[in-house]
Structure formats: C-alpha cells, structure tokens
Amino acid sequence: MPDLNGGHSSIIIAGAASGIGLATTRRLLKEWPNVKIIAADIQSGALAEVEKEFGKERLLILKSDITSAEGAAKVVESAATWANPLSGLVVTAGNSTNHASLELTPEQWKEVRDCHLDGHFYMNQAFARHLVANKIDGAIVNFSSVAHIFGWPRRLPYAVAKAGIDALTRTLAVEWAEFNIRVNAIAPGYVNTSMVINAQQAGYLDPSIIDMHAMKRFSEPDEIAAGVQFLLSNEASFITGEILTIDGGFTAKKIPWNK
C-alpha cells in the first residue's frame, strides 16, 4: 500500500473521470508525489487536464467498461504492465435512475445493478487475483452510500446495489485478510458533484435537504477523497471490513432541529 513517507506505488481508480473519482485522482497525485494513478472510466472527462498538470508518466488514462469480468481484468492487466507494483484500488464508478418501483423495467434494474454490483465485484476480484499471484499487500476502497440505511423512494436499484456493496466489502475483507489485502468502503452523503449542482439549479433537488445535514451543507468532492486517501494509507493498516460514512451528520441528525 502507499507509504505516507514517500514510497512508490500505483493505484487504480475506476470511475476517475468525474465527481469523487476525479477529486480522488487529483488528491492522490498531489499528496503522494511518488504514486502513479491508473484512471479507468468509460469516458475521459476532465482527465486530459489532470494529465497535463501531472504528466503522462504519473497518470495512465484507460477507456474501460468494468461491468464484465473481462473488462475488469483488462484494466488490471494494462495497469500492471504500465506501472508495477499495484497496491491500491478505488472503485467509484456508479450510476442511478429515478423511477417508481412499480414502473421499473428489467433493463433499468439491470443497468444500475451491472454498474454498481458487477463493476465492484469484478474489479475487486481482478485486482485481488493480481495481488495474490504476485504476493503483494494491498488496499481496496469501494463506494457505498448513505442510501444503504434508509428508504429512498424512486431509487430502489441504487439503494439495493449500495447495500450489496456493503456486504461485498465486509465479506471480501474477511476472505482476503490472510493475503494482507484490506477492503473497506466509503458511504458519502450528498456531495457537490456536477450532477448534484445541476440538479439543484434545475430545481430537481429539494433545497430543504441541505438543512437535513447537521453541518448545514453538502460535502465537497475533495472531502470524500480525503477519506479515500486515509483508507488507502498505512495509517489505516488495521482497518478492514469497515463502511466509513462521510455525510456531515446527515444520517445522525434524524430529526429537524435548529438552535
């Protein structure tokens, strides 16, 4: 795993082209000068700008689809060819839908399930296979959501997938502890990604949601990325199987309260 004292390492970030994945890519490149990042996504997004800033020798951009075992294995193979040793994996790739459960089609259900559950499992499996085969220690950070602990109308596939990622994370943490592979997840609350900002501006997001946070604001992507960095680091060397909630007191507040 990355050495906070400046050791060399390579980290795969799946879903790196936007939002939390992009913020994590930037943070790790900035905070860990000797670390190389393999940024995998179905689109390049703003990664070209990051490449200009940090250089091609530190950032490899891969166009990829991780919803299949073959796609995930190809990402790991390409990453290992470019920059060994691999020691970190972050899976932020995800999507969502907005449909009443009675109207949800099989295609809509499968689209979200494939991206979240299949994508997480296949990437975790391909990465761990590489580590075990090469006798390398490693750390994985998956992405859950606060949606795993409450009923979220019209977001059934998303909430179910995130609960599944919790189970996947804990189970793999137990199975892979013998190989010195740590597996954790982060459950963010509302984050000021472009998707959330656009939803607010279009009037699709209830403004009262901000007041549901104890801290009266949404998080910035880099605040979530800071949690990723911690879980990858040696400072989290005895943490595995945990779901770290970063939500500004959203799930803790429960009831409306104003001083």
Image (cartoon, rainbow, N blue to C red):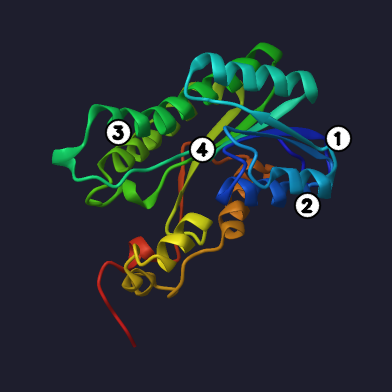
**Which of label 1 and label 3 is nearer to you?**
3
Q: Residues within 10 Å of mark 4 (few under 14, many from 20)?
A: many
Q: Amino acid at mark 4?
A: Ala
| Image height of 48 relative to 218, above or below | above
**Which of label 1 and label 2 is nearer to you?**
1
- Location of mark 3 (residue): 108
Q: Position of residue 195 (x, y in %)?
A: 47, 55
Q: Secondary structure at mark 1?
A: loop
Label 2–label 4 contact, CB within 8 A:
no
Marker disc for residue 93: 4
Label 3–label 2 contact, CB within 8 A:
no
Q: Quadrant of residue 103?
A: top left
Q: CA distance from mark 1 to mark 3?
A: 39 Å
Residue placed most toward the observer, 85 or 3: 85
Q: Position of residue 166 (x, y in %)?
A: 39, 37
Q: CA distance from mark 3 to mark 2?
A: 38 Å
Q: Residues within 10 Å of mark 2 (few under 14, many from 20)?
A: few
- Location of mark 1 (residue): 57
Instruction: Please state, as top left, top right, bottom left or bottom right, where the N terminus lies in the image.
Output: top right
Q: Secondary structure at mark 2?
A: helix
Residue 175 visible somewhere in the drawing:
yes
**Which of label 2 and label 4 is nearer to you?**
4
Q: Amino acid at mark 1?
A: Glu
* Label located before the other in sequence (2 or 4): 2
Q: Amino acid at mark 3?
A: Gln
Q: Quadrant of residue 190?
A: bottom left
- Location of mark 2 (residue): 30
